[in-house]
């Protein structure tokens, strides 16, 4: 196969086809969706291909057959019927106030009215929208298709200013309720966004939407599957470690086939280096602030169980931590438990990019710094490779000593028991090393197991004000935690004890067993 252009940043089907870019054919999923019903909602993280999928739907309904040459839809869609399409988007620019939002609605409605030669008969957006749908159905003899991209972005852009976010929510709620009111004149409606607001707020007037966010059959509606990477992008793979591509960027799942974030894959193929491309386009400042304010025990993010109901709702004035992490793409579904009438979902990091990048941001927040200096990060690899536990102790002691004392006084997160373990965990998670938390043995659970280069490090954490000194290494020895790992090489037992008073590591007892 010949190499093609990479469609980086391209969100329209016409441009991709005209430039002969790589294209993953999503039309089989699009046709299945259209055949299934009329009103749908999809939540996916940013830069996941939602806009391109919406544009594909637009071109299908408008009957632009030439764009689908060689694709599944070419032979499986009725091209004799063309529908009027109203596609709204709130993804461009910051709509920071109600006035900005109303101006955007006025501009988008005005564009449609001018295109179809229709007057603006009412001053308010809600009435104009409803009238536009009616007049288009009368004018064309076909029911209207309504597509709304980034329906929630105006609210999310101002989520830290609760009063403004609530005002924006009410304007959008009033606008979106037109879709249900105009049912007789609508052929198909599809809304996409990052968050799913609960039915008592923005969706209260639009309760006929079917949420396909965690429907297994639509898990790959956006994103690239392993098959897509191996076939469509086969010419880009030589020279890259296929296993590393999977480890770094695959793993997003909505109870079905897992996918890669397209933005990551395309940037990797262009730059030929593994970097956190997706994460760096929008560092989650608000999320990090929220997690630290709520004293989030960062090791717990490795394994979260929550109800599907909680994860599918979002409120401006009552944001559940797990829902925010899931909907924003920092956690994904890795398992599920079903009980009659109740579905519980297991969540964890989707891949190495998210795990390392988010913990790097969390580590900075936990330590009162924007980012942790490289002098505390880079030496870890060499110390672990050499098995230099004394050097590792000294490095970690220096790291904790670098946290400003003034920061402790002003941040209650530093006072809770899990703080020290959170800092320690995020420190190693930011390195991208193979770690297992609460790893089960026939005796008990190990706080943290780290495996690298044929060696294993088993960590036990204690706070000396709560547990007498020496208990950390004692527990590792008494419960024979090393037995599980002896066959795979040297095992290093590390008992780490912290002191609230000295704000540092006061004991770092080690013992190496095995060979």
Image (cartoon, helix red, strand yellow):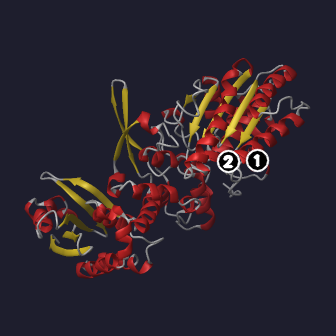
Q: What secondary structure is found at the residue carrying circle 2?
A: loop
Q: Is residue 121 above or below residue 422?
A: above
Figure quadrant of residue 55: top right
Horizontal side of residue 507 vs 2, given as left or right: left
- Whether the residues at callouts 1 and 2 have beta carbons within 8 Å, the answer is yes
Measured as percent of width and height from the top left, residue 127 is found at: 77, 28
The crowd level at tag 1 (other Cα within 10 Å; few <14, some 14-19, many 20+) is: some
State the residue in front, 201 or 14: 201
State the residue in front, 246 or 470: 470
Horizontal side of residue 62 vs 323, given as left or right: right
Q: Residue at x 45, y 43 (%)?
A: 323
Q: Residue at x 87, y 22 (%)?
A: 139
Which image quarter holds the N terminus? bottom right
The answer to whether residue 325 shows anywhere in this view is yes
Alpha-carbon span between mark 1 and mark 2: 8 Å
Q: Residue at x 34, y 62 (%)?
A: 412
Which residue in the protein does label 2 denote?
23
Horizontal side of residue 87 vs 220, given as left or right: right
Which image quarter holds the C terminus? bottom left
Measured as percent of width and height from the top left, residue 126 is found at: 74, 31
Q: Is residue 255 above or below residue 247?
A: above
The answer to whether residue 47 shows anywhere in this view is no
Q: Residue at x 80, y 30 (%)?
A: 128
Q: Which mark is residue 17?
A: 1
Measured as percent of width and height from the top left, residue 460 is found at: 20, 64
State the residue in front, 236 or 170: 170
Q: Which mark is residue 470?
A: none
Upstream in the sequence, badge 1 or badge 2? 1
Q: What secondary structure is found at the residue carrying circle 1?
A: helix
């Amino acid at each position: 196969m010949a190499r093609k252009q990479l469609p980086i940043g391209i969100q329209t089907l016409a441009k991709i086809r005209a430039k002969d870019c790589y294209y993953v054919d999503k039309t089989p999923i699009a046709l299945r969706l259209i055949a299934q019903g009329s009103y749908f909602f999809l939540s996916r993280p940013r830069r996941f291909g939602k806009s391109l999928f919406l544009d594909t739907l637009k071109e299908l309904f408008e009957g632009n057959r030439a764009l689908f040459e060689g694709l599944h839809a070419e032979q499986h869609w009725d091209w004799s019927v063309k529908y009027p399409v109203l596609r709204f988007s709130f993804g461009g620019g910051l709509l920071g106030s109600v006035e900005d939002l109303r101006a955007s609605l006025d501009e988008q409605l005005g564009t449609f009215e001018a295109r179809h030669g229709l007057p603006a008969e009412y001053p308010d957006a809600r009435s104009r929208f409803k009238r536009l749908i009616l007049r288009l159905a009368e004018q064309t003899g076909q029911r209207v298709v309504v597509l709304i991209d980034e329906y929630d972005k105006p609210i999310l852009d101002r989520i830290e200013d609760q009063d403004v976010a609530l005002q924006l929510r009410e304007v959008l709620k009033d606008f979106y309720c037109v879709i249900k009111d105009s049912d007789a004149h609508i052929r198909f409606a599809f809304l996409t966004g990052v968050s799913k607001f609960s039915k008592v707020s923005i969706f209260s007037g639009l309760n006929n939407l079917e949420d396909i966010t965690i429907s297994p059959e639509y898990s790959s509606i956006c994103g690239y599957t392993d098959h897509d990477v191996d076939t469509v992008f086969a010419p880009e793979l030589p020279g890259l470690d296929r296993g590393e591509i999977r480890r770094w960027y695959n793993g997003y799942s909505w109870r079905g086939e897992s996918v890669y974030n397209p933005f990551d894959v395309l940037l990797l193929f262009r730059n030929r280096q593994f970097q956190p491309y997706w994460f760096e386009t929008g560092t989650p400042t608000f999320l990090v602030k929220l997690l630290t304010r709520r004293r989030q025990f960062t090791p717990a993010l490795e394994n979260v169980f929550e109800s599907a109901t909680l994860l599918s709702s979002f409120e401006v004035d009552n944001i559940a931590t797990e829902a925010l992490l899931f909907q924003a793409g920092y956690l994904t579904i890795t398992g599920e438990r079903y009980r009659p009438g109740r579905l519980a979902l297991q969540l964890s990091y989707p891949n190495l990019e998210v795990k390392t990048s988010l913990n790097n941001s969390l580590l900075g927040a936990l330590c009162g710094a924007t980012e942790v200096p490289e002098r505390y990060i880079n030496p870890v690899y060499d110390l672990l490779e050499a098995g230099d536990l004394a050097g590792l102790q000294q490095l970690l002691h220096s790291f904790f000593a670098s946290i400003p004392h003034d920061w402790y006084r002003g941040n209650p997160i530093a006072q809770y028991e899990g703080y020290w373990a959170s800092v320690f965990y995020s420190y190693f998670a930011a390195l991208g090393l193979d770690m297992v938390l609460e790893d089960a043995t026939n005796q008990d659970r190990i706080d943290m197991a780290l495996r690298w280069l044929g060696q294993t490090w088993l960590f036990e954490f204690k706070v000396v004000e709560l547990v007498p000194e020496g208990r950390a290494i004692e527990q590792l020895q008494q419960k024979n935690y090393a037995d599980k790992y002896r066959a795979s090489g040297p095992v290093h037992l590390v008992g780490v004890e912290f002191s609230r008073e000295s704000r540092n590591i006061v004991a770092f007892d080690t013992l190496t067993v095995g060979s």
